[in-house]
Image (cartoon, coloured by chain):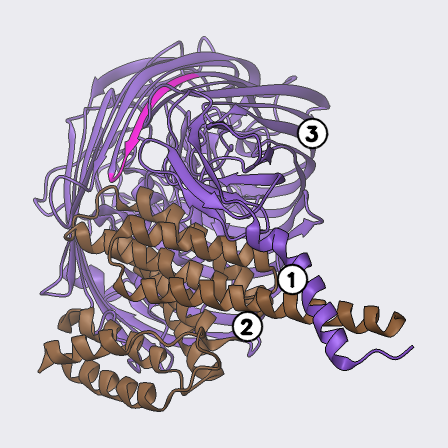
Amino acid sequence: MFVSPTVIMVKYSCSLLLLLIPVLMQAQHSIDGQVRDAHKQSVSGASVSIKDSYDGAVTDASGKFSFSTHEKELQVLVVTAIGYKSLEQKIDLNHLSSLDIILKEEISEMKAVVITAGSFEASDKKRATVLNSIDILTTASANADVTGALKTLPGAQQVGESEGLFVRGGTAAETKTYIDGTLVNNFFYSSVPNISQRGRFTPWLFKGTVFSAGGYSALYGQALSSALILESVDLPERSSGNFGISFLGISAGYQKLSKKKNASWGFSYGYTNLALAFKVLKQKPEYFNIPQYHTGDANFRIKTSSTGILKYYGYFSQNRVGVRNASVDSFGYQDAFRLRNFNMYHNLAWKENLGRKWKLNAGISFANNKDDIKGSLQNTDDQDVQLSGLEYKNFLLDVRGRYVNAKTVFERRWKGLSAFRFGSEYNYSKDQSEFTTYNGKLIPSTIRENLFSTFAETDIYLTNNLAAKLGGRLEHSSLLGQYNVAPRISLAQKVGKESQVSLAYGLFYQDPEKRYLPAQGDITFSKATHYIAQFQKVASNLTFRAEVYYKKYNDLLKTSLINYREVAVSNKGKGYAKGFELFWRDRRTFKNFDYWISYSYIDTKRDFLNYPGKIRPAFAATHTANLVVKKFVTKLKTQFNANYVFASGRPYYNIRYNNTDGKYAIYDQGKTIPYNSLSFSMNYLPNVFKKGAGKFTVFVFSVTNVLGSRQVFGYQYSYNGYRKEAIVPPTKTFIYIGAFINFGVDRRQDVINSNL
Amino acid sequence: MKKIILSFSLLLFLVSAFAQSEKYMKAMQDKISALDSTRDANTLKDLSATFERIGDAEKTQWLPYYYGALTLVNSGYTTWMNSQGNTSGLAEKLDPLADKAEGILNKADALNKNNSEVYVIKKMIATLRMMVDPMNRYMTYGPQAQEALEMAKKLNPENPRVYYLEGMDKFQTPEQYGGSKVEAKKLFEQAIQKFDTFQPATVIDPQWGKTSTQYFLSQIK
């Protein structure tokens, strides 16, 4: 058969034409309708389109849309909108009436209610945080101490005579600190009588801080009152070196980021000597060993996958201090106290996403702490002497602690934000002490504890407006030979566009403080029950919180004086704390001006340790208020920070052991004057934000207690109770001046972070 | 006859393929030309949705997603400019928008890896996030923006938009924070040079920015 090309062409064209006719002749359909949410509220800005076509539209302010399409018959309509689950719906273009589309809300972190009862979070990532990471560093009274800024939040007491966080009627020992999930045993430098010590770790080490004043998650235990949860930084942005010099010492460090930006290592070293500062700022106690600190740290961080990271942080420090005060017991004599401390801390943490829904958080830490303490009574020539009746003032105390803390948490996500977490924790401690009395008698003791815990917790997001966290924790102590079971429940419900109500309930158990052990008689865990209700409103740059709580203490430790030592004898102590707290932060009203106000009211009484009965503890002030202000003045390239703290007077007692009836009794009591402190700080950043600058410098100037207000933290009594002496800070006003330079590489962030 | 059917179906295939790409090119050209004349935040959002639809329908083209992200970011910038420096409430509006833009851009990135133009948008998204609350966000998004821009430059040193954005940073930052009109001018001039020699791969490939550069350059003189 022969067919001419023309015929083919004609045939072809005809068939092509025929084939194309349906396409060309296809009728244009118009589609219109409205998109609404489950509450029949119109959704604007939703995208409506026909799947696999270009045709579609975006809904207007009233949720309406209309467009036309050349597609025909059965098609799939796709509707998407930010904050809603996308919807695919089959439509028949030939039989189409106005569409009424209902979108379901997506449970998202942006919109969902956040459980906040009891806790304050400082982070840059999450939305519902009250503080930013930088706030921890720029609060005037904080002095670059992690817990400094937290003391301006409601719930924390202004206790100036010793370190730690005293939260809601609890002692400092009732607050536990965690770094990357694992417990830290000696978070603060070792105690010196009546002088508050700083935290060991610089704030720039952490990118996220959660301060919980109660009702916290089942992932954490062994803290009756409060948990401070710190998350360490990830890989640095760049490699850099830095150098710092101040009134108090020098520091230098280096951070190296690998070329592929998947690993880094670094180290730093600092030497602090307060000799110069003490020359300028007169101190009340006489320092025969001016405080000196050597600190060094090293770290590496390795990305183990696109989501996983392995982090190591190692730290050591050595310090010594010796103070001498005129003895309250005997005229012409002095009480001397000398401390040498060595501390080492290693933390290895691993975070990884195991598949799509599973997450792993594992960590192990090892720490070693050594305190050599010598107490003595000295004459005017600074010679050790023994006075009859006051022999106990001469002693030696060697304390060694070894700690291992390990924790593994698995997380399984299910629908939306809901998740299930479980895991276990192991805490090992070996606390050894050797107490040498004036006559050379050696009293050794070793306390070993193996604490195993297992926990499970689930977050349930019923809607964006209602969430619950249910958890439980089981602990077994080898020291006590006992178990405890601690349920924890919290709920949050949105009550308005920007406001929510949260509730929390939980049981909290804690081991007896090791320094009162070994005990005489059987002892058990101390227990606290928390009930918390909170209202929170967060608008843009505006936060308001009000919280009420009731806390019940049971099985608190009671002590007695045995061989000059305070020793645990029972768990018959109990108590309560109740109160309300307010917090207001406003970054909106005044331009470039940020302030917050916090107020705490507490009513608390407890019978514990050597208290003869239920009394208000010496570390609890009824009223505490803070005003914190911050302003960055662009023209001066300077940030100004100030804060004012007020706390009503605290009770003080002279509690003595009465040998005749073998009981403690109160021989005298009173109330201190109210506490006032106004602090101020300034950070001058001459080349801030300058791109590509070879170096970056920060000057810091800060003054605590600018007005030199008299501060009394309590009273110290002579052994016979005849005399008392006010416990006051070593210096009324403290001034700090320093400069920090980051070299070579443009890495402003850390410099700003570490020094502001 | 077999041959005929074969060649016929081949032809039909080619014709439809051509028609398809014709349709794509035309739609893209239409929308890209609308891009230059649109300054309204909502219209830009609509335009972004259109680009996204084209991207979803085409499945293998990165440009619709690229423009989808660009228009969304521009809509964010417009909203920011209209706020007249009052940043209150901006984060709630612009953060979801930046998230969305990032989502769209990631699709472009997946289809066309290591593309200088994609990094230009990454930079713009980071800057948008920063502008919402510069005091608190500078530390996070400042380096992120800079890093993306450096990457864009590394991938294509001839990309004029890199120099335009560098110039904009210098232009908009106050002097005391390291901004400089002198340096901005230099960068804008450099950008203009690059614009003059820049050859987009196709008519629908990115070629925006020259008019704006000229405008800002005229503001300095």
- The chain letter corresponding to brown is B
- The chain letter corresponding to purple is A
Q: Chain of mark 1?
A: A
Q: How many marks?
A: 3
Residue A538 within the magenta-colored segment of the rendering? yes
Q: Secondary structure at mark 1?
A: helix
User: Please, what is the three-letter code of the amino acid marked with disc 1?
Assistant: Leu
For the N terminus of chain A, the quadrant is: bottom right
Which residue was labeled with disc 3? A479
Residue A201, above or below A613: below
Answer whether labels 1 and 2 touch (C-beta < 8 Å).
no
Residue A612, above or below A516: above
Residue A609 within the magenta-colored segment of the rendering? no
Per the model, the C-alpha gap separating discs 3 and 1 is: 92 Å
Per the model, the C-alpha gap separating discs 3 and 2 is: 46 Å
Which label number is shown at residue A17?
1
Q: Is residue B33 left or right of residue A347?
A: left
User: Please, what is the three-letter code of the amino acid marked with disc 3?
Assistant: Leu
Question: Over which residues does the magenta segment extend?
Answer: A532-541
User: Please, what is the three-letter code of the amino acid marked with disc 2?
Assistant: Lys
Which residue was labeled with disc 2? A261
Residue B51, above or below A226: below
The 10 Å Cα crowd at callout 1, few under 14, some 14 to 19, many 20 or more, is few
